[in-house]
Amino acid sequence: MVRTSNMLRIVSLCMVLLLGSEICIAARQELIVTTIKQDPYTMSKGSQLEGYCMDLLAELAKKLGFRYKVHLVKDGAYGRQDEGGNWNGMIGEVVRGEADLAMAPLTLTAAREKAVGMTKPYMQTGISILLRKDIVSEEAGFFDFLSPFSGETWFGILIAYFVTAVCICIVGRLSPCEWSQPETEPNRFTLLHSLWYAAGALSLQGAGPHPKAVSGRVISCTWWLFAVVLLACYFSSLSSSQGSDSAPLMIKGFEDLANQDVIEYGTLAGSSTLAFFKNSNNPSYRRIYEHMERRKSFVSSMDEGVQKAKEGNYAFIGESVSLDLAVARHCELVRAHEVIGMRGYSIVTPLGSPMLKNLSVAILQLSEAGELAYLRTKWWASSCIPDSAKGSSLRVHSIKGMFLVLAIGLGIGVLLSLFELTSKSRSTAGEQKKSCCAVLTQELSQRLRMTKTKGDQET
C-alpha cells in the first residue's frame, strides 16, 4: 500500500510538471491587463473601454477561457528603457508583475523581446509619411488633358458628334431650301463636309458654308449650344484640377522627403520609429534622423502629429496603420505609398509565461478565420466620400441635360426637313396634276441616292 501510494504521488507530480501551465491558468481567477488610450485600439465609452484591442481581447478570452480585468497604464507610456535598464509604461508594469498582459499597439522589437514575452503579431505595420493632399503633387501623365471628363463622357461626346454630322448630312439632302435642284445641282453637305462642319463648331472656329434652311439652322444652333456648354465644363474642370495639383513638391517616399527643405517633418519622440531611423545605415534615413534631431521636430503624441500635418507644411512620420486611420478620419490628408521597416504589433506577457504559446496560437486561428480582417474593417472604416478615378472627372449624368437638348434639336431639325420636302411635293403635285405621294417618293429617291442613272431621270 505504501509503495502504491508513493507511485501515485510520483505520477501526480509528473502531471503537475507537464501540465503546470494549464493548471496555473485555470487556478488564476482573472488576469490583469494593462492598456493605453489610442484611437481606435482602446477608447472610452462611458465607464467602459472599446476598440480594436478590446474586441480582440474578448475573442481571445472566449477562445482560451480566461477572465480579465483591464486598467489604463499609470504613466501613459508604451514602454521605453532608460539608461539604468528600467522600463516604464506598459512594458514596465508587465516586468514588475503589476499586470499579466499588455494589450495595445506595441511594436515587436529586439529590446522588448529581451525583457518580456511577445506573441505572434496580430497586425502588420510599417513606417510611412502623412501629409496634406494639397502639398503633394503627382507626376503629370501624357493623357492628363483627358481628366476633366470620364471615359464614358468622352464616348458619349464622340457618339453625339457622329450622330449630329449624319443629321446635318440628311437634312442637307432632304430640305429643298438647302438642295433645290438635285438633278443638276451638287449637294453641299456631303457626309465628309458635315463631319468637318461639326468639328469646326466644337473648336469655336466654324466651317462654311452654313445651312440656309430652317431645319439645318435648328440643328446647327443646337450643336453650337452643346459645344459651348461642353467646352465651358471642360476648361472649368481642367483649371480646377490643375490648381489642386500645382504643388511645388512631389513627394512619393522618404528619398524625396530627405532631399527637400521646404516641408518640415518629424515623428513621435522616443518611439520605435525614431529608433529605426537612428540605427539605420541607409544614408537617406540617416539624413532624416539628423534633420529631426537638429530641428527638434518631434511630437509628443499621435494626435499632435496629425494636427500639425492638417495645418500644412509638415509631414508626420509614423506607423502606417495609424496613418491609415488618420486618412480615414481626416479627408484632407493622404499617406505616401512607400512603407518601410515592416514590423508587427504583439501582445506582451511576462518572460516564461505559459500564456504566450496559447495566445500566439489563438491569434493565428483568428487570422485564418478572417476575424482580424473583420476587426480591421470595422474600426478603420472611412468617413470620407470615395472619389472615383479623379474627383474632377465629369460623368455622363453631369451633363446629361445637354445630351437631351441635343437629341431634341436633332429630332426637330430632321422633322422640319421632312415637312419642307412635303410642302414642296404638294406644291409640285398641284402644278403637275400628280399624286402627292408619287411626287414625294420621286423626290426622296432623287435626294437619298448617291448616284443617278439615266433611266431614273427619264422616269
Image (cartoon, grey):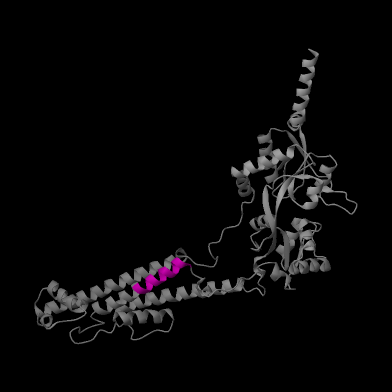
Q: Nearer the viewer, residue 424 or 284?
A: 284
151 falls in the magenta region: yes
Give the total number of marks visible in the rendering. 0
- Give the quadrant of residue 372: top right
Q: Position of residue 131 (x, y in %)?
A: 69, 64
79 horizontally vs 403: left or right: right
- Main secondary structure along the magenta-highlighted residues: helix
327 horizontally vs 8: left or right: left
Q: Which quadrant is home to the C terminus?
A: bottom left
- Give the quadrant of residue 385: bottom right
- Give the quadrant of residue 435: bottom left
Which residue is situated farthest in the right direction here? 84
Q: Nearer the viewer, residue 401 or 82?
A: 82
198 versus 401 height, above or below:
below
193 versus 254 height, above or below:
below
Q: Which quadrant is home to the N terminus?
A: top right
Residue at 82% in and 68% down: 295
181 versus 287 height, above or below:
below
158 horizontally vs 306: left or right: left
Q: Position of residue 373 (x, y in %)?
A: 61, 47
Magenta residue span: 150-162
Q: Position of residue 103 (x, y in %)?
A: 74, 44
372 horizontally vs 89: left or right: left
Q: Position of residue 215 (x, y in %)?
A: 30, 76
Q: Nearer the viewer, residue 457 or 324?
A: 324
Which residue is situated farthest in the top direction here? 1
Can residue 51 be spotted in the picture? no
Can residue 40 be spotted in the picture? yes
